Amino acid sequence: MRRLAIALSLLVGTLLAPVGHVANAGEELLVISASDGSVTRLDLGDLKALPVSEIRTRTIWTTGVQEFRGVALRDLLDHVGAASGMITAVALNDYLIQIPTSDATIPGPIVAYLHNGKQMSVREKGPLWVVYPYDDNPVYNTEEYYARSIWQLIRLEVPR
Amino acid sequence: MRSLNSRLRTGFWLTLVLMLIAYSAMLGREAMVRLDSLSTAASDDIRWNMSQLEVELLRLQSASFKAQSGEPADLAALRTRFDIFYSRSQIVLHGALYGSARAVPQVRSKLTTLADFLTDSLEIVDATDPVLVTRLPEFATKVELLSPEVRDMALTIVNTSARAADIQRVKVSETLRRLALAVLGLLVALSIFALLLLRLYRSGQLVSAEKEAVKSRFEAAVRSALDAVLVVDTDGLIVEFNGGAEAMFGYSRSEALGQPMADLIIPPHYRAQHEEGMQRFRKYGTSRVVGRGHLRLEGMRKSGEVFPVELSISLAETSDQLVFVSFLRDITTRLRTEHELREARDIAQAGAQAKAELLTVMSHEMRTPLNGVLGSLELMERDQLSPKQLRLLRAIRVSAELLLSQVNRVLELSRLESGMIEFPKEPFALVTMVQRLTESLNAAAEEHGNRLRLNVIGDDPGIVLGNRFALQQALVNLLGNAIKFTRNGEISVEVERLADGRMVEFRISDTGLGIPAEDIDRIFDEFVTIDAAYARENPGTGLGLSITRRLVWALGGEIEVESIEHEGSLFLIRLPLEPGEPVENASENEKEETGSLSGKRVLVVEDNDINGMLLLDMLEEFGCQVKLERDGFDGVAAATSTHYDLLLVDISMPGKDGLATLREIRAQEDPATHVPAIAITAHVREQDKKRFVDAGFDGFLAKPISMAQLQKEMSALLLLPEEAAAAEPSIAQDFIQRFGDAEYRRYLVEMVDELSAISNDLARGDLTDALKAHVHKQAGSAAILGQIDLHAVLQEIEAASPGDWAACMDGVLGRLKSELAAIRVVASGG
C-alpha cells in the first residue's frame, strides 16, 4: 500500500513536474503600491473579479499563436485609482522596468493570469505576465515593448 | 506628324516614370520590411536573454550552495531560482526568438545538454525537502557542469545572431542603395517629363494665344461688320448681337442677349416654320437654310415693322458649343430700287418698242401716199404746163423723192435695230466689187470737182467670204458722205488685208470739211446732222452713219473716225472677211449682168387685176416668160403641172390665201427642184416676215412694187448680181409710163364706178364677208393708183366688225363718197 502510494506520488510528481507549482486561490499574487503609500494586494479571485480582457497573438518567446486572458492594464490602474505617469513593474527575478501609464490603452496590454486557458506556474512565466497585442499593432514589435512585457510579475508601483 | 511624335514621346516618358514609381514603391516597401525586421529581430533581446540565462544559472548555483544548510527558506529559494532558470531556458528551447539559432548544430547539442539537465533536475527539485537536501551535492555538481556549456552556447548564439544582423544590415543597405538609384532615376525621368510638359504647356499656350487672337479678330470683325450679325445657339437663344443688328432691329445688345431669337426678330407668320426647322436640326442635324448661300426672308423690328432681309446662315463650333452664325442685310431699299429700275426699264423698253413700231408703221404708211404724190407729179409733167409751173413741179418732186428716201432709211434702220436681219455669207471678189462701186460713184464725185481713187495696199485679198450687199451699202454711205462734204478735193478708198489674215481694213478718206472735234463723238448717233457749210445743199436724215455703224456691227466689224476740221476726215472699217473659195462661173456671172433674168419662167398668182397686169408688164420687160393666175387654186394647179424658175404669190387672196397656196405647192414639189418664191403683200412688219418664211417663201415684196425692187429681189434669189440703180421710181409713175395716161384714167373711173356700187350695198347696214372681199380688191387698186385717202377709208371698212358697222357706217360712207367724188373730178377733168 505504501509502495503504491509512493509510486502514485512519483507518477503524479513526474506528470506535474514540468508544470511546477501554480498559485492557490487566495494566495497573494500582486502587490500594487501607490506613491502616496497605500498598498493594494490582489489574489487571483480579486483579479478575476475585474473586467476580463483577452489577447490572441504570437510572441517572440513562444511558438505559435497564444491565447492570454487577464485584466487590461488600464482597468487595473483605474481599479487602484492610479494617476498618469510612470509605473514601475517588478518581477520575481528582480527584473524591473518602467511602463508609462500612457501604454494603458484599450485595446492594449493586459496583465494575463491565464495562458491558453491555464494558470501559469513560475516555470511557465507565471503567475502574472504583462502581454501586449503584438500581432494587432506593429508598434509593439520593438525592443522597447518587448522589455515592458514583464513576466513573473509580482509588484507594481503606481503614481497617485 | 509633329504632334504624333510629341505624343509618342510624352507617352514613353510617362510610362517610364510610372514604371520607376512602381519600382521605387516596391523597393521602398522592401526597405520598410527589412528595416522593420531589423527593429523587430530583437537581436538585443537575444543577447539580453543569453546573459540573463547565465545570470539565472549563477544565481541558481549560489542558491544551491546556500540550501546545503537545510533551512526550508533556502530550499524554497532554491526551488524559485530553479523555476526562474527553467522558464528562461524554455525561451531558448522553444521561443521563436531562437528559431534560427536552434538550427545551428553546435547550439543544438548544447540545447540537448540543457534540456537533459532540466529533465534530470526536476526529479531532484520537485522531491521532498529531505530528499532534496540529500541530493543537493549531486544537483550542485550538475549545475556546475552545465555552467560552461551554457556559457559556450550563449557565445555561439550571440555570435550567430550578430552575423545574421550584419547580413540583415547589408541587405537593408543594398535595398536602400537600389532605392536611392531608383529614386534618382525617377527624379531624372520626372525632370525630363516635367520639361516635356513645360514644352507642351508652352506650345499649348502659343496655340491658345493664336486661337485667342483669331477669336478676338473674329469678334472684332463681327462687332464692326456693317451687316447685322447674329449668333444663335441650338436652343434658339441669341449669344451674339452686333452693332449692325442693333441698328437693324432696334434692340440693344444687352436686351437681345440670351433671348429667344424667334420672339425677337422673326415675324409671327414665320415662327412656326422656324421652330419646325430648329427641331428638325436638333433631331436629325439637317437644315434647309444652313450653308445654302443667300436667302431672302423677312425680319421684324422692335417696332413690329416687317421688312425684307437677305441672309446667309452657317454652322460654327465655338468652345464646344454648336452655334448658327447669321449675316443679315436689310434689302428694303435695294428691293425698292430694283423694282423702280425694273419699271423704268420696262417703260423704256415699251417706249423703244412703241417707237420702233411707230417708225415702221408710219414709214410704211408714208411710203404709199408718197408714191401717189410722185406718180401724180409725173402725170402732171406730161401736161402742157407753163415754165413756172414746171419749175415748181420739179421742186415738189425733188422734195417728195427726198422724203421717200428718208422714209426708206428710217425703215431700214428700224429693221437693223431689231436685229432680225441676217447677213448670210457668200464668196465674192472684194476688189472687183469695190472697183465697180467707185466707178459708179465717179460721176457724182466729178460733179463736185472731186477725184475718187481706189488703192489696194499689199496683196489683192481676192475672193472673200462675207455679205457683199451689207458691205456695199456701208461703203456707199461713207463714200456718199465724203463726196457730199468735199469740193474740188480728193477722196480715196484703201483696202488692205491685215496681218492676222482674217480682217480686212477699209480706209475712206477725204480732203473735205471735216468734223468739228466737239461733234465727233456723236456722229454715229441717230438723227444727228452736223450744221456744216453745205448742209443746205445736202439735207439728210442723220441716219446714214448710224445705219453704217449698225451694218458694220452686224457684220462683226468695227468702225472708227478721225477728222480735222477744214482738212478732212478718215473713216476706218475693219471687217472679218476670211479668204473664200471662188464660186464656179463667178466671174462670168459678174459680167453677165443685165438681161440675166431674160428667159426665166415666172408664175404670178394675183387676184388684183391692176397689180397682176403691172407685174406681168414688168416681168415681160425683164424678158421673162410669164403666166398669170387669178387665184390660189389655179396657182397650185399651174405650179405643179409646169416647171417655173420663180413664183410671185399675193398673200391676201379670197378663198385660198398666198400662204396656203405656197404650202400646198411646197408639199407637192420635189425638194431637189426647189422653186424660189416671193410673197407680195401690203404688210411688211417683222412678225409677218416670219410667217412668210415659215410658209416657204424665200423673199417678199411690199406693195406697191417698183421695178427696181422686183429686179433686186429676183436677182438675189436667182443668184444674180444686182443690176445697180439705187433709186426707186414711183409706182404710179411706172404705171403711167407703162400704160399711158389714158389707161390710168380709165382704171380710175372703173374703180370709182365699182366702189359706188359697193357703197350702195354697204349703206344697207349689212357688212358681209362677200362685201369685204370686194372692198379689199378695190383697196389694192386704190393703192396702186395712188389714191391714198381712198385706200385708208377702204382699209377702215375692211377692218370694221359687222356688229359695229351700223353705228359707224354713216361717217365712213360719207368720207368714202367725198373721196370718190374728188377722184371722179381728177379722172374726168385732166
Image: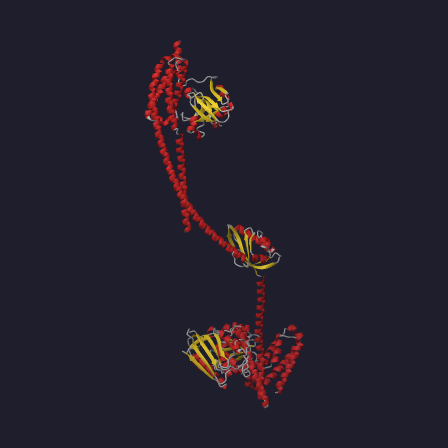
**Whole-percent x, y for residue B271 in the image:** 59, 54
Q: Is residue B144 left or right of residue B498?
A: left
User: Front-most of B352 and B90?
Assistant: B90
* Horizontal arrangement in the rendering, residue B203 relative to residue B298 (left or right): left
Residue B680 lies, with reference to residue A84, above or below; the image says below
The structure residue drawn at horizontal position 39% and vertical position 33%, both measured from the top left corner, is B34
Where residue A53 appears, as percent x and y from the top left, is 48, 25
Quarter in which the C terminus of chain B is drawn: bottom right
Q: Residue at x 39, y 43 (%)?
A: B188
Looking at this view, is B251 or B554 the one in front?
Answer: B251
Indicate the quadrant where residue B650 lies. Answer: bottom right
Q: Is residue B70 visible?
A: yes
Asked whether B250 or B304 is in front, the reply is B250
Please state the horizontal and vertical placement of residue B425, each as a whole percent of the image: 46, 74
Q: What count of labels does the image hold?
A: 0
Q: Is residue A65 left or right of residue B149?
A: right
Q: Residue furthest top?
A: A1
Q: Which quadrant holds residue B16?
A: top left
Relative vertical location of residue B768 with respect to residue A47 in this rendering, above or below: below
